[in-house]
Image (cartoon, rainbow, N blue to C red):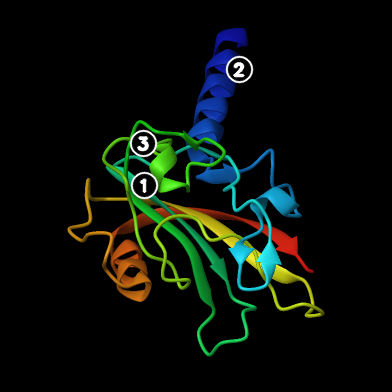
Amino acid sequence: MKSIFLMFSALLLAGTASAQGLTLSSDSAQGQLAMKHVFNGFGCSGENISPELNWQNAPEGTKSFAITMYDKDAPTDGGWWRWLVFNIPSDTTALPENAGKTDAKLAPKGSIQIKTSFGATGYGGACPPEGDRPHQYLFTVYALNTETLDVDENTPPNLVGYLINAETIQKASTVAYYAC
């Protein structure tokens, strides 16, 4: 009877472990962005440093990852793309702080960062209009079923977003807020 109980417990734990989905977290952007994460331009004077991001429990079949940062509260018709990184190798589970600065070369080898809604390549931090309500910045990691998206750093963000969604197996998000 004891061996049946142990076997049942082991099966239950194995099922629970495999049922966990993809998760995304950040130690440096826990709910609120700091001045170091704020854009430097457009009336904002931050350091424009991307937060570190960590993910785990990638689903079976993951061949690469993509990361996006999106501001749906931007005063535009379609929000504001602040960061898009893709072709991140499948054995990667984190991006270090400041990986969004392309000349720092901290992003994984082979990954591509494209132009954001700011018109610059790499991370474009928070920068809501002064006096506006806190903006919600959505960081998302996508587990993709392809090793690479066949586009370059000049591809428009909306097209890359479309291609990412077309290849997504699973995704996870975390939100951070910021107001001036």
> What's under tag 3, amino acid-wise?
Pro
In the depicted structure, whether residue 146 falls above or below residue 151: above
The Cα–Cα distance between marks 1 and 3, rounded to whole angstroms, is: 11 Å
Badge 1 or badge 3: first in the primary sequence: 1
Residues tagged 1 and 3 counted as in contact (Cβ below 8 A): no
The outermost residue toward the top is 2
Residue where numbered disc 2 is placed: 5
Residue where numbered disc 3 is placed: 108
Q: Residue at x 31, y 44 (%)?
A: 111
Residue where numbered disc 1 is placed: 65
Q: Nearer the viewer, residue 122 or 67?
A: 122
Give the class, few, some or many, for how many residues have Cα within 10 Å of label 1's Cα (few <14, many ≥20): many
In the depicted structure, whether residue 90 falls above or below residue 121: above
The Cα–Cα distance between marks 3 and 2, rounded to whole angstroms, is: 45 Å
Left or right: where does residue 139 sit relative to residue 119?
right
Residue 116: image quadrant is: bottom left
Q: Secondary structure at mark 3?
A: loop
Give the class, few, some or many, for how many residues have Cα within 10 Å of label 3's Cα (few <14, many ≥20): some
The Cα–Cα distance between marks 1 and 2, rounded to whole angstroms, is: 39 Å
Q: Secondary structure at mark 1?
A: strand
Q: Nearer the viewer, residue 25 or 134?
A: 134
Q: How far across and how far down the image is residue 37, in percent? A: 65, 52
